[in-house]
Image (tube, rainbow, N blue to C red):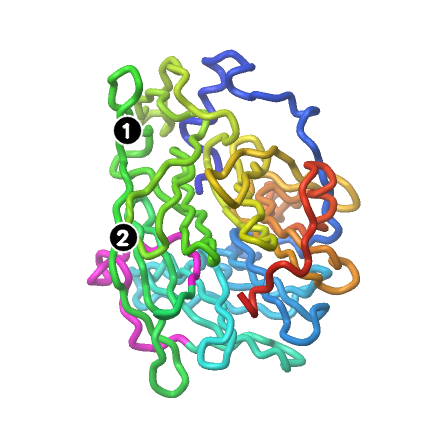
Amino acid sequence: MRTLPLLACLVAALVPAAAAVPAAAGDIPTVTARYETPALFDDGDGGNANGDDPAIWVHPGKPGKSLVVATAKEGGLYVYDLKGAQLQHIPAPPAPGEDDAPGRFNNVDLVYDFGGRDLAVVTDRGRDRLRVYAIDPKATGAPLTDVTDPDAPFLFNTTQAEVNEAKTVYGLATWQDRTGVYALVSRRHQTALGLVRLTPAADGKVGYRLVRTLTLPSSFKLPNGATWTPCLEPGELPQVEGMVVDGGRDVLYAAQEDVGIWRMPADLTGKPVLLDKVREYGVPGTYNPDTEECDPGVDPGFGGTHLAADAEGLTIYYRRGGTGYLLASSQGDDTFAVYRREGDNAYLGQFRVGDGRVDGAQTSDGAMAMNVPLGEDFGHGLFVTHDGVNTPEARDGDGEVRENTNFKFVQWEDIARKLNLRVDTTGWNPRKN
């Protein structure tokens, strides 16, 4: 994620408006959030907390007691109830040395019944590790406990000096099949994906080992014969962050931010297929060191029409019979694209989260949908999204605007009604499928 994508923010000035945005803002259905979480502030007074990625944990016996677990980069991990009230805060680990990077929690996903315990798994991009937390459904206070194996290794690096260069673990999706429990991870500023197996360790801890990696392309052959490489800062390649595994099909979807959405076998043994592209796909650009941005060329017209870079958070709304919906955050235009889960993932529509009883969501990094009933407010399912521009605006003691993020809770039936989608509260359950 980049707060302002280097290329996407400039392309609109050089191409016709109809090419940059396929539908006027008023034509895109808008839903509103039922609840939101408290503001997180990315400054010293706020503990450098910058919201990023949410996960919805379903309580085994009391759906209304389900939780939302969310990352906040250097701010660590936050746990909320279904009305958005904070229940727990877990700080990211400190830097191991004076000149080293501190912990920085990027993405989170869930595992059910790993040795009898539910787990929240987190990518710590500051330390290049996974961190694992057991979830106690009987807890009256803080429900999460750190159970990470203290001997857990770096994921993509071999020394702390390499970790400090920040090409570390980034995106995350969990996956279970008959062979074990896994995390799929990506690497910051690189195109590598990794398959990581979770393993029991001593004293009830959880460790992991890297099984294999797969490298996505960083350059692409265009229909006109030219080769295109997304314009990024020197030394960076087009990274993946948003990921989700379709557990019923053992398929991984991965959002390469400046490229589009890939579909591939979850065990990383097959060939990836690019199922949709961002609008900026194929637009040439030259990095300008004076402005630290990309100067774009003329759009050759090879991009998609549904996603504005960055392509970000991915999630699946499951329905019975292998059907459902794949949702993707189109960060560049503050919308979410919806595709069929089945078949060739046909595009179904777009929506945004707008202002209502709470403010809307912009520049969303991560989101998650859940179909099962979750208490009185979300009896038809829940959609939670990161909001990268939370309001009302807040200022520090010097009058400067504070970077302000949080998470929005949306009733699924509102999304379904606006896009003519289905509500299916019994066709799938994360504890049974």
Counting residues from the start of the chain, the first of labels 2 and 1 encountered is 1
| Structural distance between the alpha carbons of marks 2 and 1 | 21 Å
Residue lying at the far bottom in this picture: please name it. 203
Q: Residue at x 56, y 69 (%)?
A: 432
Of tags 2 and 1, the one toward the viewer is 2
Q: Magenta span has 174?
A: yes
Residue 389 percent location from the top left of the image = 61, 41
Query: Residue 49 or 24: which is nearer the viewer?
Result: 24
- Total marks shown come to 2
Amino acid beneath label 2 = Thr
The span shown in magenta is 148-175
Label 2 close to label 1 by CB (< 8 Å): no
Residue 85 percent location from the top left of the image = 70, 63
Tag 2: Cα neighbours inside 10 Å, few (<14), some, or many (≥20)? few
Q: Residue at x 51, y 60 (%)?
A: 75
Callout 2 secondary element: loop
Query: Residue 406 or 223: which is nearer the viewer?
Result: 223
Which image quadrant is residue 218 in?
top left
| Picture disc at residue 251 | none
Question: What residue is pinned by disc 1?
Answer: 220
Amino acid beneath label 1 = Phe
Q: Residue at x 69, y 69 (%)?
A: 63
Tag 1: Cα neighbours inside 10 Å, few (<14), some, or many (≥20)? some
Magenta stretch, main secondary structure, is: loop
Which image quadrant is residue 283 in?
top left
Residue 59 percent location from the top left of the image = 64, 72
Residue 404 percent location from the top left of the image = 60, 47
